Amino acid sequence: MKKKARFAGVLSLILVLLLAACSGNNEATTSEGGETAESDKQGGTLVYGRGADSVGLDPINVTDGESIRVTHNVFETLLEYDQNLELQPKLATEYSSSEDGLTWTFKLREGVKFHDGTDFNAEAVVFNFDRWMDPENPYHQGDFPYYPFLYGGFKGDENHLIEHVKATGDHELEIKLKRKTAPFLSYLAISMFGIASPAAIEKYGDTLNEHPVGTGPFMFEEWSRNKTITLAKNPEYWMEGKPYLDKLIFQVIPENAARLNALQTGEIDVLDGMNATDTSSVENADGLELLKRPSFNIGYMAFNTEKAPFDNPLVRQAINMAVDKDNIVDAFYNGLADVATSPLPPSLWSHDDSLEKYDYNVEEAKKLLKEAGFENGFKTKLHTMSNPRPYMPEPMKIAEAIQSDLAKVGIEAEIVSMEWATYLEDTKAGAHDMALYGWTGVMADPDNFLYPNLSKTNTNVPAQNIAFYKSDEFTALITEARETIDQDKRIELYKQAQQLFQKDAPWLMLAYTTPPLAQMDYVEGYVPHPMSNDLFTDVYLSN
């Protein structure tokens, strides 16, 4: 019999597990209530198989999911999103705001230590904010991509959001804003703003990327590039008795088939990133369990709108009609995706479900190309990552399907494939014509999908807005929405922005996915998080 488990709320710290029927020496000890005894949850190493390596391990300097899934277990944020995408306390236990919504006071968790033995306190949080926001700070080393597009730039910039961050007690913090900002609390829950040890920052400087030190359930031990990252149990973690695992290893296996084989042979315990067509074989296999990550992502192809002919919206609209998106979703997602229309996923409030996708229409696409001056088509390049992503399970095959469709309207697209870190570097530098891309939300607010990826403020290299879409009107709408407290008004602004996006077509929308994962049936307590920042605090092995 297979066991199923789920996390309880972040604050309750109660893990409810159903006991499996076991035999012989593998039988787990149970309490009177039928739960596995805490002592039997302790120990062991879990190997998590994935398709690509992390780019870096300093959370403020990364935006990719492969980095975040590691740093989220090493560093902790002031607040955190639970499985239901509700904000919960983490390193901050309470918060309140002034009547004008500008001054926020936080009470911080006491008795917490960083992995190097130093104390977590309000001064440590101030140290981190000073590093993040001040370009003159000696430890402000790197791009810090998330900070400026959330906080309106850095200290000294005209639109910088923060007036001050100061300690008002050993475990009390005050953050004063210059203007009301609706998603401010959500910013504090983003993994990129994990609190690092000030002593470690001073010690390692710009090599903190390879020596991460936080307060999380696991401590960094070793990184073998493009192979494994090994984390060890934090014996002084503030949640008593946790984590259960002794070690957590993230192992890179680029090919989906090879990764599945590694799961079947017991080389890895959890598999992330698999061919959708393999889900049935996992469901029917003894000893394996199929998991599904709740959908909170978008998959798309970005046009580099700074390069001809993609600076012409008619060309972008034509390509949207030339690609058979229904066929791609049917062929490569095995019922685990829906064709996308909006840059906001359907599970997120203010998603405009009145938007209609560009219908597959080869003749209409040809007409638009002719109107744009490309009756005979043109040559271009389509960049793709070589490894699977939650929103792009088989990127090369999807690229080939797009290539085939474009050929029908006279567009000859050469596919350029590269490994993940290089791919991010090239696309953020604008080296592409078209590029497969996607986004998994890191906060449950439309601001997180629209502002990083489509605001004109995020087109400076290295750009997160890899379409280099510089619409003044669109950016004004999402900026007003960010600074509007009234939720109904925000919804209206975001719907206007989505309508404008649909007309301008800086992306070819592909899919909203429910990414499949798999695990050995002895893995207990692992519940994939919608944001992909899975915590392994409550995970244990039953044999």
Image: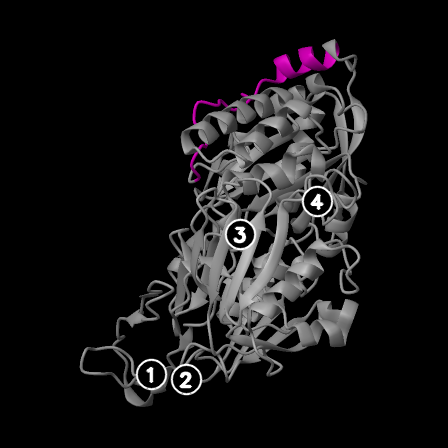
Residue bearing mark 4: 153
Residue bearing mark 2: 42
Residue bearing mark 1: 38
Q: Residue at x 53, y 41 (%)?
A: 181
User: In the image, 531: left or right of 311?
Assistant: left
In the image, which residues are magenta? 348-370
Mark 1 or mark 4, earlier in chain: 1
Q: Main secondary structure of the magenta part?
A: loop
Mark 3 or mark 2, earlier in chain: 2
Above-or-below relation of 310 to 232: above
Q: Residue at x 75, y 47 (%)?
A: 156
Residue bearing mark 3: 275
Between the residue at mark 1 and the residue at mark 4, the CA separation in whole angstroms equals: 47 Å
Q: Are marks 4 and 2 in contact (CB under 8 Å)?
A: no
Q: Is residue 494 shown to the viewer in this render?
A: yes
Mark 1 or mark 3, earlier in chain: 1
User: In the image, 230: left or right of 446?
Assistant: right
Quadrant containing the N terminus is: bottom left
Q: Is residue 360 magenta?
A: yes
Looking at numbered disc 2 in the image, what kind of residue is underneath it? Gln
Q: Is residue 51 shown to the viewer in this render?
A: no
- Whole-percent x, y for residue 171 in the image: 50, 70
Q: Nearer the viewer, residue 344 or 458?
A: 458
Mark 4 or mark 3, earlier in chain: 4
Q: Which mark is residue 276?
A: none
Between the residue at mark 4 and the residue at mark 2, the CA separation in whole angstroms equals: 45 Å
Looking at numbered disc 1 in the image, what kind of residue is underneath it? Glu
Between the residue at mark 3 and the residue at mark 2, the CA separation in whole angstroms equals: 33 Å
- Whole-percent x, y for residue 49 in the image: 56, 66
Number of residues whose C-alpha sits closer than 10 Å to that of mark 2, classed few (under 14), some (14–19) or many (20 or more): some
Between the residue at mark 1 and the residue at mark 3, the CA separation in whole angstroms equals: 36 Å
Number of residues whose C-alpha sits closer than 10 Å to that of mark 3, classed few (under 14), some (14–19) or many (20 or more): many
